[in-house]
Amino acid sequence: MRLETLAVHAGRRVDPTTGAVAPPIHLSTTFERDPDGSYSRGHLYARNSNPTREALEACLAALEGGAAAAAFASGSAATAAVFQALSPGDHVVAPHDAYHGTGRLLRETFTRWGLATTFADMTNPAEVQRALRPTTRVVWVETPSNPMWKVSDIRALAALAHDAGARCVCDNTVATPVGQSPLELGADLIVHATTKYLGGHGDLMGGAVIARVADDMLERVRAVQASGGGIPSPFDCWLVLRGIQTLPWRVRAHGENALKLARFLAEHRRVEAVHYPGLPSHPAHALAARQMRCFSGMLSFQVRGSAAEALGVAAKVRVFTRATSFGGTDSLIEHRASVEGPNSRTPDNLLRVSVGLEHADDLIADLEEALS
Ligand SMILES: *Cc1c(COP(=O)(O)O)cnc(C)c1O
């Protein structure tokens, strides 16, 4: 079945006891045993499994074309579970522009657990090749990457990982399953912050790990989920499931709005540069066009001048909201360097935009006014 149909139906069915078409939210922490002591209905205790979470996991696996999924309380909990599934002494190659929290986990938390990490420019396969070691177990890919929206070649990086005996893990939060299918390109695992486009309304936190095959790695991720307990609440699972029903239509609309905004910004005399993979001027537009079905709603632009000029533009918006995060209905704008702190490599004059679902003309008018 096609993505739009899976988004509406995967993991869902009419409730057999009531006929309810929308799925119920199962809040129970514990489940009845059969007289013989078994659990023939599949559930024992809600940290291990819960029917609402199970529905979400089935849906996520179907959307990404994976064998199975494990849902977590946040994208970061899902990311951490992948690293916790490794062993001390293992080595990870990660993008130097990985999601801020992912970089921090590797630098601050997991080095103390004995994981070694080399940060590399994932747009340069030769550099990734040099970073590989005999102990490399994971090559972490994130494309497009934040906040310059660089595009790296999932197929090439997965092949490098496999030649080195490592797995390729792709954070697909920005592109979503609507924009690209990393498992088809050779990735072994996908990580999502469902907080973003999958939830889609800026009102929940969640994450997931999706596996191409149900192997020992997935078993270890599942063990972290069940024993570590970083699980999403049934209500949050339900909200993600609900958000996913409109995901294909939302993501395409976010992308259409983003392209219009990117074209407007590229022509503006106060804009020094626009970073959006959907623009032919993007350095990896050809790769993006090959690898992606649509280019997401995330873009960044640099205002001529310094941080003061960029902050001045962000201060004047009225339709956009000055806030972090992305993937919701509301357009957001953010001065990235000040969020990232003193070690940030992000240009001082860069504003990151999450293009929402308002009318593109209203968004353009708002930025036009803010740039005037
Ligand atoms: C937001 C985000 C995460 C982390 O997700 P949380 O739900 O905030 O923990 C991981 N990767 C990417 C690409 C993200 O945008």
Image (spheres, rainbow, N blue to C red):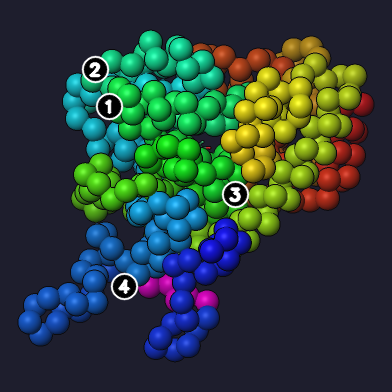
Q: Are marks 2 and 1 in contact (CB under 8 Å)?
A: yes
Which of discs 4 and 1 lies nearer the camera? The answer is 1
Q: Which residue corresponds to the image point at 60% horizontal and 24% vertical from the top-left?
A: 150
The Cα atoms of the two marked residues, 2 and 1, are separated by 8 Å
Q: Are marks 3 and 1 in contact (CB under 8 Å)?
A: no
Q: Position of residue 11 (x, y in %)?
A: 44, 67
Amino acid at dot 4: Ser
Compared across the picture, whether 248 is left or right of 228 comes to: right
Q: Which mark is residue 178?
A: 3
Tally of numbered discs: 4
Q: Which mark is residue 134?
A: 2
Q: Which residue corresponds to the image point at 43% horizontal and 48% vertical from the top-left?
A: 207
Q: Nearer the viewer, residue 318 or 35?
A: 35
Badge 4: few (under 14), some or many (20 or more) residues near its Cα, within 10 Å? few
Q: Position of residue 51 (x, y in %)?
A: 35, 69
Q: Is 192 rendered above or below residue 32?
A: above
Badge 1: few (under 14), some or many (20 or more) residues near its Cα, within 10 Å? some
Instruction: Decide which of tag 2 and tag 3 comes sooner along the chain.
Output: 2
Badge 2: few (under 14), some or many (20 or more) residues near its Cα, within 10 Å? few
Say what secondary structure mark 2 lies in: loop
Q: Nearer the viewer, residue 155 or 10?
A: 155
Q: Which mark is residue 165?
A: 1
Which of discs 2 and 4 lies nearer the camera? The answer is 2
The Cα atoms of the two marked residues, 4 and 3, are separated by 33 Å
Name the residue beneath numbered marker 4.
28
